[in-house]
Amino acid sequence: MRRVFYLVQKEFRQIRREKAYIAIIFLMPFVQLVILGYAITTDVRNVGVVVVDQDHSRYSRAILASLETGETFQLLGTVPTERAARRLLDRGKAVVAVIVPHGFGQNLLRGEQPALQLLLDGVDGNSSGVALGYLQGLLAGLQLEWVREVPELARQIQSIHLIVPEPRLWYNENLVSVNHIVPGILAVLLTMITLFLTAMNIVREREIGTMEQLQVTPIRGWELILGKVLPFVLLGFLLLNVGILAVQLIFAIPMQGSLLLLYLMSLLFMLSTLGLGILISTLAHTQQQAMFIAWFFSIFTILLSGFFIPIENMPDVIQYLTYSNPLRYFMTVIRAIYQKGSELPVLLDEVAGMALIAGITISTAVIRLRKRNV
Amino acid sequence: MLHHNNQQTGHRELPPTPAVGSAGSGAATSQPALLAEGVSRSWGDLPVLIDISLQVASGEIYGLVGPDGAGKTTLIRILVSLLLADSGRVLLHGHDTRLERQYVRRHVGYMPQRFSLYPDLTVEQNLRFFGDLYAVSREEQLERCNRLYRFSHLAEFRQRRAGHLSGGMKQKLALSCVLMHAPEVILLDEPTVGVDPVSRRELWDILHELRQEGTAILVSTPYMEEAEQCDRVGLINAGKFLAEDTPEQLVANLQVRILRLRTTDPWATWQRLLEAGLGLQVQLFGEGIHLTLAADENQVEVEARLRQAGISFQQLYPVKPGMEDLFLARLQQVEAVSSEVITDV
């Protein structure tokens, strides 16, 4: 056990010599959180809208007026023809064109089908989908106001009993995506540092030949692994705390749940990524190879974690694949602790998932390191 | 484990003691410190070591001499149990290295061919780290460091990073790290390759001193002249021993006579000798060209043949065969035998 201490001591002596590590731990969280936290947003804002008003009724003017209020849309103005509107879409000036045809108001009052054309730039499918949703809601609201003004229609409406949904948003009342993204960035940061640094560090020892030198000392396999895992767990915790501080300072996002629970979960998560890092180191002969393999894994780890893309949206096969991804579990955990204040009992599935992955990767790594020994 | 620590701390720091007994295995003093029996190993289909046996006694320097690719490194890696032999066994003070790996780890010092210390740690931090790993107490580390600094003249560089040392200093530091736990058996893989002559001498001085203290030393080298520094030498080529004995005896046993031929342009003369095909064994050396005489040849006759072939030279005189002549002669004998075998088939 004393030998593990000496290994850890040696590791920190080396880390202290490496200025890059210090930058990674203390600067990277701030820089990444600031840039990514504000850049990665799923909020749809300032969607450029152009209106073709062929009706010139008070109804079409009401549509124009409601597009001008709120942050979702930015009314670029009206154009006389549909062709002019298309040109704006083609050139990317506008994302949405609302075409109010002649006789729109008339039809509405007569109780006939009031048709209205919407043209959307579907290149960014997600944003235009969200914009379409907003527009439909907005138009439905307007229609409800208008029909009430016509006594006959109002009576009919009364007898229909439309569904009146009453949404209450929990955990993130204002649907601020920063609250969702920022804890996610923290999780991604933790993945990167543990995965890359462990893999590179062990391969470096092999490259410079010290691994062999260590193998002729009385160090045992598990001591060697522990001596490698511990320093990076400690570094990971340091990074996590700097990150938590940055989240508090920059975004003022309060942590609803228990910090201790987050620590425990982070430990479990780091064990699984460190295991993967050691495993990568047994596959690579040079630091460059280790880097490439680590990149390969981390891209999948991040994309299939539910960080950007909800896992439920993925095809079934891919969804099954995500069960082997430790970040998938930790992403859920860190968001739940930050936003919902979840307690341990509701996170047991995630605990099991991460523990299983940690167990498999670390034991495989130990076996592979032993084999190399011979 | 405690017992062995006592041994290390007890005897080994004393001033030179007679070789026998200091290595400490108590009862069996006749037992060699290191014993290899019938070790073979192949990489895939390629045999690298074929039935190698050797022993090294306490207080003995054993030289493993052979060209690059002879199998020296593979053999040493097997002896320190970094690699398993396909067959054969290795005993360290009677302990089978395959079964008692921890015993081997504690009592053996291994210095690999390539510099393999932490370049970003200082000289002292490297020394201390290896001392720590072998559970050498702090006070003892200090003592040993100072003693090793005396040997290696690294004291003034103790705060320098290992990566910033010169080649010779690196090797001396590597050897010092190996010696931090005062091992009873040390194995050094080509420690003098790429090292300046002064550091090379210092390294050999350290080895001689360790031998005085009763350490068993196995050292490999591609330099034939270094064989003369060893107590016993194994000449190895293509995974097989060509010969094994004391350097003096090896040379004495060799029934060859060597003539040295001096010219102004040795290389051109050597080329012409090869082309002339005089049936002589010809080797180019720094000091001149060596001609190996067959049993029925003499200097006068050879001189006549050279003149006949129109090869001019300044001097032709007999010299005592050196290690290199020996190695090459042995190699030719072996090749002659194996080609006979082939023609027989």
Image (cartoon, coloured by chain):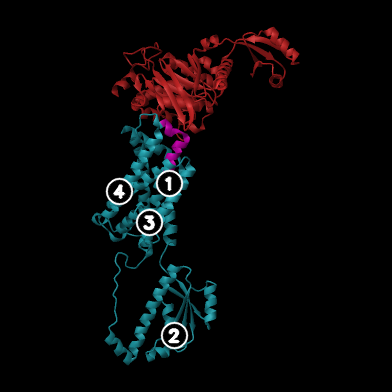
Determine which of the numbered discs, if any, sits on residue A305 in the image.
3
Amino acid type of disc 1? Answer: Phe
Q: Residues within 10 Å of mark 2 (few under 14, many from 20)?
A: many
Q: Position of residue B47 (x, y in %)?
A: 48, 28
Q: What residue is shown with label 1?
A: A196
In terms of sequence position, does the residue under pointer 1 or pointer 3 come before the other? 1
In terms of sequence position, does the residue under pointer 3 or pointer 2 come before the other? 2
Q: Looking at the image, how many numbered discs can be counted on the residues?
A: 4
Tag nearer the camera, 2 or 4: 4
Q: Position of residue A230 (x, y in %)?
A: 35, 41
On what subunit does the disc labeled 1 rest? Answer: A
What is the magenta segment's predominant secondary structure?
helix
Seen as rendered, the residue at the extreme left is A345
Q: Residues within 10 Å of mark 1 (few under 14, many from 20)?
A: many
Relative side of B32 to A101, left or right: left
Q: Which residues are magenta?
A: A199-213
Chain identity for the colour cyan used in the image: A
Residue B309 on the magenta span: no
Determine which of the numbered discs, if any, sits on residue A181 in the image.
none
Q: What residue is shown with label 4?
A: A355
Mark 4 element type: helix
Q: What residue is shown with label 2?
A: A60
Using the rendered view, name the quadrant where residue B31 is placed: top left
The image shows residue B252, relative to residue A20, as above or below, that is above
Relative side of A179 to A79, left or right: left
Q: Position of residue A88 (x, y in %)?
A: 53, 75
Chain identity for the colour red used in the image: B
In this rendering, do the residues under marks 2 and 4 share a single chain?
A: yes
Q: CA distance from mark 1 to mark 4?
A: 20 Å
